[in-house]
Image (cartoon, rainbow, N blue to C red):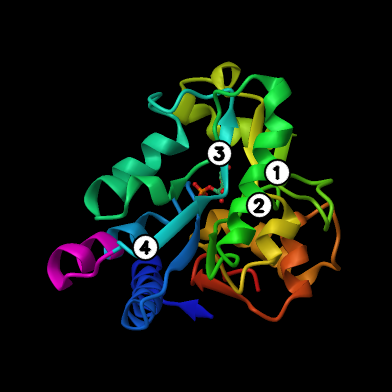
Amino acid sequence: SVYPDAKIASVDVAQRIASLIRAKQREGGQVVLGLATGSTPIYVYEELVRLHREEGLSFRNVVSFNLDEYFPMQPDSRQSYVAFMKEHLFDHIDIDPENVHIPDGTLPKENIESYCLAYENKIATLGGIDIQLLGIGRTGHIGFNEPGATRDSKTRLVELNDLTLRDAAATFGGKEYVPTEAITMGIDTILAARKIILMAWGKGKAEIVKKTLESEITEEIPATFLKTTEHVEFVLDNGAASSL
Ligand code: GLP
């Protein structure tokens, strides 16, 4: 769906998340959210924080799994996705810190494989992800699944694409300071979610949005794998939809 602007779209996405949280609360159940970082989901988190503060929305029954984290990365580093999630969401809501999961960028390399397997197992044990939020990178990545990522990929350590490093350079004060690797949920992990909402805002995303929607399904544009499932929704603003 195309919305007049990112804020209106984000409020709508946040309200849908809130409805699910409330519905599950009434039946005493949990909600598993798959969360994304980057500038794209910021307004959604803003609205969720507002709903918590002003309308008493509680996150006590929410379990969250973030898509990705740079590697290596210290959680207390300013550029970490842990810091991002705290700043934009977790520090302002009542989610139980024990229910928050973000890939660990501090692990010794030899432990990553078993860590990633455990991450997958935790999601599965909780019954899978109810709603997965996604942004899209200019390479067509979702999470950090760069071109070449396979349909059956799971949570794992990956190398970042050069365009991704360049896009992250400003945040890190220079491309040479951007970690060249990341831990990310895989394409298969993402597609297993019961509902996937990919958001894209602004003209800067128009080209990759067009490519994703119009191209055949290909590893060269990992976001095209989303088109293989029914339960995905592309939420765009006018800018991101401007080349369609
Ligand atoms: C990062 C994240 C992605 C995100 C993408 C787009 O690399 N790992 O999950 O979707 O960039 O970022 P932005 O939302 O800032 O455009």
Q: Which residue is mark 1?
A: 117
Disc 4 marks which amino acid? Val
The answer as to whether callout 2 falls within 8 Å of ligand 1 is: no
The answer to which of marks 3 and 2 sits earlier in the sequence is 3
Figure check: 12 above or below 42: below
- Left or right: where 147 falls relative to 47: right
Can you give x and y, in whole percent of width and height, for residue 174 in the image? 52, 20
By secondary structure, the bulk of the magenta-drawn segment is best described as helix
Rendered position, 26 above or below 209: below
Task: Please give the name of the residue rendered at 60% of the width and 60% of the height, measured from the top-left corner.
Answer: 125
Residue 104 occupies quadrant: top right
**Label 1 vs 3, first from the N-terminus:** 3
Q: Residue at x 59, y 52 (%)?
A: 122
Indicate left or right for 176 with 111 as reference: left
N-terminal-most mark, 4 or 1: 4
Report if residue 11 is visible in the image.
Answer: yes
Distance CA(mark 2)–CA(mark 4): 27 Å
Span highlighted in magenta in the image = 48-58
Q: Is residue 159 visible?
A: no
Residue lying at the far left of the rendered structure:
54
Residue pointed to by mark 2: 121
- Give the residue type that dot 3 points to: Pro
Residue 208: quadrant of the picture: bottom right
On whether ligand 1 comes within 8 Å of the CB at mark 1, the answer is no
Q: Check if mark 2's residue and mark 1's residue have beta carbons within 8 Å.
A: yes
Q: Is residue 53 magenta?
A: yes
* Residue 1, percent from left and from top: 54, 80
Q: Residues within 10 Å of mark 2 (few under 14, many from 20)?
A: few
